[in-house]
Amino acid sequence: MTSGSPTPIDFRSDTITRPDDAMRVAMSDAEVGDNVIDSDPTIVALEERAADLLGMEAALWTPSGVMANLIALSLHLSRGDRFLAPRGAHVLTNELGSAAWLAGGMPDPLEHDAGPGRPSPAAVRAAVGPADGPYYALRTTLLSLENTHNAAGGAITPPDEHAQLVAAARDRGLNVHLDGARVWNAAAELGLPPAALTVGVDSVSACLSKGLGAPVGSVVAGTAEFVERARRMRQMLGGGVRQGGVLAAAGLVALDRIDQLKGDHENARTLAAGLRELGWDVVDPQTNILLASVPDVSLTLEHLRGLGIRALPMAGKVRFVLHREVTADDVDEALRRIREDRR
Ligand SMILES: *Cc1c(COP(=O)(O)O)cnc(C)c1O
């Protein structure tokens, strides 16, 4: 082995993926307009494509997934409304409380009683009381799902369970939002169109800037009426961008790459198997996220860093995220470094 610091292998997040040459060419060639005054043709093309893939009537480009979720929650919730979401959901733990602070909702987490990242339909029904309770009863109006569930290790909710959760929510008069930041990963892994995982929802958000590799951008989709209201909200939040087509062009390239996510899942399985062989306590990855339980997360992260392996903490564990800038060879190399280090 050569001396000096080893080339870093970066498992921190699929958000670190940089636009490649093909994407940059598409960005530089993009036809653009002013998407606030009237419209930008490339943003329009992206929104139509995303709506189609997600099986929704219309979609809206947003600069980030956090903004997409905030817009959806703001439109679904009135001040003081209670909403349900699986424990550890991004809207509960990673959006700085905006669901309460800005959208006015009172969050209540649901346990994962049906499996990792998955509350049961019975739990949804039980969480909402009868429609006409006493005056001090909470008004519960929304179920916010997450597929794949990030903090549960990229866990998939399969379409049949998704449908049952939506049915339970409807039964109790709730609207349903799906945080589908990585719904593309779930679709690729199951070999289904993304629309198969959004059946019955009122709105869905999805990221273009994670595993799909766009530098910027998410979408929020729903009915045409919902998206019109969402457009006004995006403008209020400062998310109306002018020549946004430059960014949407990257999104269009990204949407051609959904199938390629399977490679990341394969690499996640290889990493899991390798780490387990080395005595690590890992959860079997369902998609591109691998969680490892260790006695001291910061100590392990620091140690890995010394080996040129970067990861982040998540839900009290070490989280490795596989993405298009980590190759199968990189995974082998990371495993080799950890193995050598033990000798
Ligand atoms: C990353 C992520 C978001 C937010 O996306 P940003 O583009 O980082 O704002 C929302 N939900 C989930 C589940 C995520 O993993």
Image (cartoon, rainbow, N blue to C red):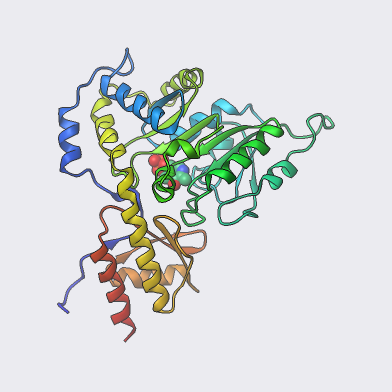
- Please tell me which residue is depicted at 31% across the width and 16% down the height of the picture: 39
Q: Quadrant of the C terminus?
A: bottom left
**Count of marks overlaid on the render:** 0
- Please tell me which residue is depicted at 25% across the width and 60% down the height of the picture: 327
Q: Is residue 167 left or right of residue 92?
A: right
- Please tell me which residue is depicted at 56% across the width and 52% down the height of the picture: 117
For residue 298, above or below residue 242: below
Q: Is residue 49 visible?
A: yes
Tell me the quarter of the picture where residue 243 sits.
top left
Q: Quadrant of the N terminus?
A: bottom left
For residue 4, above or below residue 90: below
Q: Is residue 219 left or right of residue 105?
A: left
Give coordinates of residue 162: x percent, y percent.
Answer: 57, 42
- Of residues 273 and 80, the one nearer the viewer is 273
For residue 226, above or below residue 339: above
Specify the farthest residue to the bottom.
343
- Please tell me which residue is depicted at 23% across the width and 29% down the height of the picture: 246
Q: Is residue 65 visible?
A: no
Q: Is residue 138 left or right of residue 212?
A: right
Give coordinates of residue 164: x percent, y percent.
Answer: 63, 41
Give coordinates of residue 6: x percent, y percent.
Answer: 21, 70
Specify the farthest residue to the right.
134
Give coordinates of residue 239: x percent, y percent.
Answer: 38, 27
- On the rendering, which quadrant does ligand 1 occupy? top left
Specify the farthest residue to the top.
38
